[in-house]
Image (cartoon, rainbow, N blue to C red):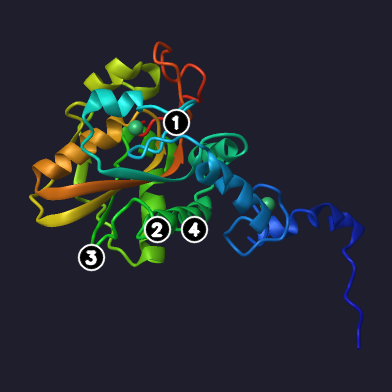
Amino acid sequence: MTAARPFSPRFSHLRARLPAAIGAACALCNGPAPIGQLCSGCTRDLRHSMRHHPWRCARCALALPAPGPCPDCADQRPSLEKVIAAFDYIYPADSLILRYKNARQFQLAAAFAALAVDAIQLASPGGDCPPWPALTPLIPIPGSHRSLRRRGFNPAGEFASRLGRLLNMPVLHSLLYREPDHLKQSTLNRRQRRANTAHLYYCARNIRMPYAVLVDDVLTTGSTLNTAARALIAAGAQRVFAVVIARTPYVARDEPEGSGLPDTLSSPD
Ligand SMILES: [Zn+2]
Ligand SMILES: [Zn+2]
């Protein structure tokens, strides 16, 4: 019986990186984790606020500072029935999103999808979301040409693909389209965002489906998702839901949105 060969001193610096290199390390703490997933401790921490924050909008999942109506949903007459978010866009989850979107760590989509499945199961059927019938499609929000060129992938599309595999739901990548040449959402306040996205999306064809589920990476004001939902309803969808990776926290209404957030957050860009 031969003993395991020790790491050569020349390569000992790689020992700590080995789990990450073979995909068996948690993307947050670098501890042991199932391949492509976060460890159980980080999973629990990431889900904590979504499960235990005392006040949250039942429609858009916005964590509220006190009981009361959600200002965005009250103003927008939302087309969406309900948004399910895997976790809140707060530390340290925000770092995962930035690595996913900006550092091309698209393998994180698998961990995000697992967390989203957990949130969906929590909301349905025992929670406040009706079960989606078989063959309900997942429809990712399309990225702009500019962001696709920069990133090389569509974060919402990659997340939708992973989610579809886990939920055994079809993913329609070529149904929803985005008009070109709109302003970057993260530079705009709430009112400007709504105007900017008012006619941003359209469907390539009519659809006959009772339910449709939009998929996006980060939900900020809901302008993008509500505009996309209106496009799906105009094309024939009857009830539109949404699943997102992360929900941004409450922002005071007069603040120009995006001022304290990375400029890569908004969905259209
Ligand atoms: Zn961890
Ligand atoms: Zn709301």
Distance from Cα at disc 2 to Cα at disc 4 = 8 Å
With 14 as the anchor, is 217 left or right in this view? left
Identify the residue position indicated by label 4 in the image: 114
Distance from Cα at disc 1 to Cα at disc 2 = 20 Å
With 115 as the anchor, is 241 left or right in this view? left
- Residue 176, x across and y down, in percent: 20, 45
Q: Residues within 10 Å of mark 3 (few under 14, many from 20)?
A: few
Residue 268, visible in the rendered structure: no
Q: Residues within 10 Å of mark 4 (few under 14, many from 20)?
A: many
- Residue 214, x across and y down, in percent: 28, 47
Identify the residue position indicated by label 2 in the image: 163
Identify the residue position indicated by label 1 in the image: 265
- Residue 133, x across and y down, in percent: 23, 64
SS label for mark 3: loop
Q: Quadrant of the C terminus?
A: top left
The answer to whether marks 3 and 4 mark residues whose Cβ atoms lie closer than 8 Å is no
SS label for mark 4: helix
